[in-house]
Amino acid sequence: MEAAHNAYRQNRKTGLTRIDMLIALYDKTLKTLDAGTQALRDGDTETFASAQIMACRCVLALLDGIDTAQGEVAENTQRLCLFVAGLIQETGVANWQNAQKLLQPMHDSFQAIREEAIALEASGKIPELNFQATYEHAVL
């Protein structure tokens, strides 16, 4: 995850765009869900546990990038990702398959608009990501 953020920060050096980073994150999430599903089928609890942690991290990264102030589509995307987060907390094959089925169309949609999104970012119509955000939390 951090590597993707660092790569984006160096956007001008690497040419990585916002949409490419998002598509890569969806790719990683879907591949992780696939690996977790297979581990569940195989009864491989160690691999599943690793996949579950990575899937959680990926979905959290997706959620972190959603600005619900942008309207109904963003709000619905957040709801979908929150639902997926709940599914991956379970250990059933069906839950993990459903999580994949829910995220695949999102991935495909971003793939379909990739060229347009790159052009919008290049023209400045899509703002840069803000990596200066901070979060306060407490540990009790």
Image (tube, rainbow, N blue to C red):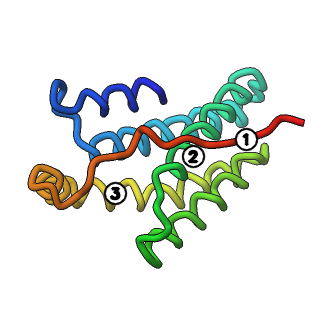
Query: Closest to the observer: 20 or 7?
Result: 7
Mark 3 or 1: the one toward you = 1
Mark 2 or 3: the one toward you = 2
**Cα–Cα span, label 2 and label 3:** 16 Å
Name which quarter of the figure residue 99 lies in. Answer: bottom right
Residue at x 71%, y 54% (from the top left corner): 87
CB under 8 Å between discs 2 and 3: no
Amino acid under disc 3: Asp
122 left or right of 76? left
Q: Quadrant of the C terminus?
A: top right
Q: Position of residue 131 (x, y in %)?
A: 41, 39
Q: Position of residue 64 (x, y in %)?
A: 52, 49
Amino acid under disc 1: His
Residue 119 in the image: above or below residue 133: below
> Which of the numbered marks, if any, corresponds to residue 59?
2
Mark 2 or 1: the one toward you = 1
Q: Position of residue 120 (x, y in %)?
A: 15, 58
Task: Determine whether the residue tagged by mark 2 lies in a helix, strand or loop.
Answer: helix
Q: Position of residue 30 (x, y in %)?
A: 49, 43
> Which of the numbered marks, if any, corresponds to residue 108?
3
Instruction: Decide: few, some or many residues near mark 3? Use Cα within 10 Å; few <14, some 14-19, many ≥20.
Output: few
86 left or right of 17? right
14 left or right of 73? left
Residue 84 in the image: above or below residue 31: below
Amino acid under disc 2: Val
